[in-house]
């Protein structure tokens, strides 16, 4: 039986990027439908009536919502290759903890004045990374997927906040570049300059230009 | 080798109650350590340096933090009895989704009801009623959110039941009037010893919040 996979997404979304990466890691074919967020499609509203947000993965007509829940679903359904979460319950709990940490802190980086907090968050994450190539250890996994989508927004944060993430947190940048060497990642996240242009157009639209 | 299980918790915490219910469902023996949140122990700060919050489950010396992550861990480690999450991947994703809805909507609205006043409080009350109605819709005619068996979403939500008295009193509304099916579900859950022994006494929670309001929010 053919698997039908549809991803409702919005291209600069770091949450959508998580799902793209997970699907590609598992070698899955899927159709991506771009949502125009001010004009949400009837399909999106039908598939995610509670939050009305992207990303939504629709598998054989059934919707799964919330990016980390979707990534876990993909990992469990297609468990024959590229495991994203560790099998050991304690290691799994740690991976879930760090992905949750990223989600809890994500709203903080929306305002440029919290540059100091952002650097602090990256430093905490650097601490969790230690000297490992990836958050999970030797293999690319769940926490890497949870965080790497934010990379396409780094240029925007740096420009708006007038600082260099690499200068403050070189290990995070080294880790990001390592992740980008994977085709599943480089094909899932967009050009940081395009993201920057979009962010600037939002700033203008919402009267944030000085 | 015997398992050493310690739970750093606080009697009133609905998040701590989730861990208590899950451990009771699995018949796991553990040591309950009450934390004074105004004076956190060195041990708590060491076991949860990132968030410095309870609950923390410490299993053979290793800490697990965040209540829903703890419940999933408990379900995975003690998998021989009382499964909390469904075995089907899609159903599991749905269970995680609804537990997340509880965290995003019920928990936030609840705090708003007892810690604010005026328009903010009215907004919080409306959000609470909307959230509970949404959950009631998801429950439908099932005995539990998990279907015939008590499960993950039931564990995630039932602790809030002992906080309903706080919400109803400060919000001046009746949850039973708005969501009768949900109250029926809660009473069914309370028949389980794992639940009734894990939840706090609603009157004690109320007294605690009266004190909190005065001390931290300047509310009578």
Image (cartoon, coloured by chain):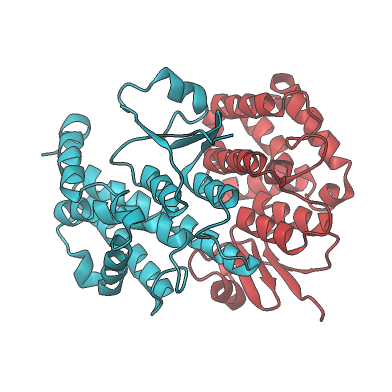
What is the total number of numbered labels drawn onto the structure image?
A: 0
Q: Residue at x 20, y 50 (%)?
A: B202
Residue A85: image x %, image y %?
A: 71, 48
Q: Is residue B218 above or below residue B161?
A: above
Q: Which quarter of the figure is the C terminus of chain B placed in?
A: top left
Chain that is red in the image? A
Colour of the chain lettered B:
cyan
Picture layout, residue A129 above or below residue A62: above
**Residue A15 visible at all:** yes
Q: In this view, does A34 lie above or below B209?
A: below
State the residue in front, B27 or A76: B27
**Residue drawn at point x = 54 percent, y = 52 percent:** B75
Between A40 and A187, the one nearer to me in the picture: A187
Depth check: give the residue in front, B162 or A24: B162
Q: Residue at x 65, y 52 (%)?
A: A15
Judged left or right of residue A113, residue A61 is: right
Residue at 29%, 39% (x, y): give it. Answer: B11
State whether residue B50 is above or below residue B92.
Answer: above
Residue reaching furthest to the front: B1
User: Residue A122: x percent and y percent?
Assistant: 64, 28
* Image-based side of A134 in relation to B206, left or right: right
Residue sitting at the far left = B220
Decide if residue A169 is on the left or right side of residue B23.
right
Asked whether residue A210 appears in the rendered view, the answer is: no
Image location (x, y in percent) of residue A166:
75, 24
* Quadrant in which the N terminus of chain B appears: top right
């Amino acid at each position: 039986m053919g698997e039908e996979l549809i991803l409702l997404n919005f291209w600069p979304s770091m949450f959508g990027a998580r799902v793209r990466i997970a699907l590609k890691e598992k070698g899955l074919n899927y159709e991506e439908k771009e949502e125009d967020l001010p004009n949400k499609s009837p399909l999106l509203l039908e598939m995610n009536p509670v939050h009305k947000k992207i990303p939504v993965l629709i598998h054989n007509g059934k919707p799964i919502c919330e990016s980390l829940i979707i990534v876990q679903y993909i990992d469990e359904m297609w468990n024959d290759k590229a495991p994203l979460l560790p099998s050991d319950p304690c290691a799994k709990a740690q991976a879930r903890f760090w992905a949750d940490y990223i989600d809890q802190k994500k709203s903080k980086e929306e305002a440029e004045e919290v540059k100091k907090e952002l650097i602090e968050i990256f430093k905490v994450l650097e601490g969790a990374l230690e000297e490992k190539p990836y958050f999970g250890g030797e293999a690319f996994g769940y926490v890497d997927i949870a965080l790497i989508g934010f990379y396409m927004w780094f240029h925007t944060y740096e420009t708006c906040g007038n600082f260099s993430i690499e200068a403050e947190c070189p290990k995070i940048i080294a880790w990001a570049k390592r992740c980008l060497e994977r085709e599943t990642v480089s094909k899932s996240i967009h050009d940081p300059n395009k993201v920057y242009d979009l962010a600037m157009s939002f700033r203008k639209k919402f009267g944030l230009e000085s | 080798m015997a398992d050493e299980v310690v739970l750093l918790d606080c009697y009133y915490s609905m998040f701590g109650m989730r861990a208590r219910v899950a451990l009771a469902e699995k018949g796991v023996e553990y040591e309950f350590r009450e934390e004074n949140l105004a004076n956190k122990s060195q041990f708590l700060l060491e076991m949860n340096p990132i968030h410095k919050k309870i609950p923390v489950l410490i299993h053979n010396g290793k800490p697990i933090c965040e209540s829903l992550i703890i419940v999933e861990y408990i379900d995975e480690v003690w998998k021989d009895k009382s499964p909390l999450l469904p075995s089907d991947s899609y159903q599991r994703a749905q269970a995680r989704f609804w537990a997340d809805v509880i965290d995003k909507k019920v928990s936030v609205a609840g705090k708003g009801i007892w810690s604010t006043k005026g328009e903010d409080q009215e907004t919080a009350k409306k959000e609470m009623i909307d959230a509970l109605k949404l959950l009631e819709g998801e429950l439908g005619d099932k005995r539990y959110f998990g279907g015939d068996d008590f499960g993950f979403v039931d564990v995630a939500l039932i602790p809030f039941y002992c906080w309903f008295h706080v919400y109803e009193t400060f919000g001046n509304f009746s949850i039973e009037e708005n969501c009768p099916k949900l109250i029926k579900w809660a009473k069914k859950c309370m028949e389980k010893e794992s639940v009734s022994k894990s939840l706090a006494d609603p009157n004690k929670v109320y007294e605690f919040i009266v004190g909190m309001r005065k001390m931290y929010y300047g509310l009578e």
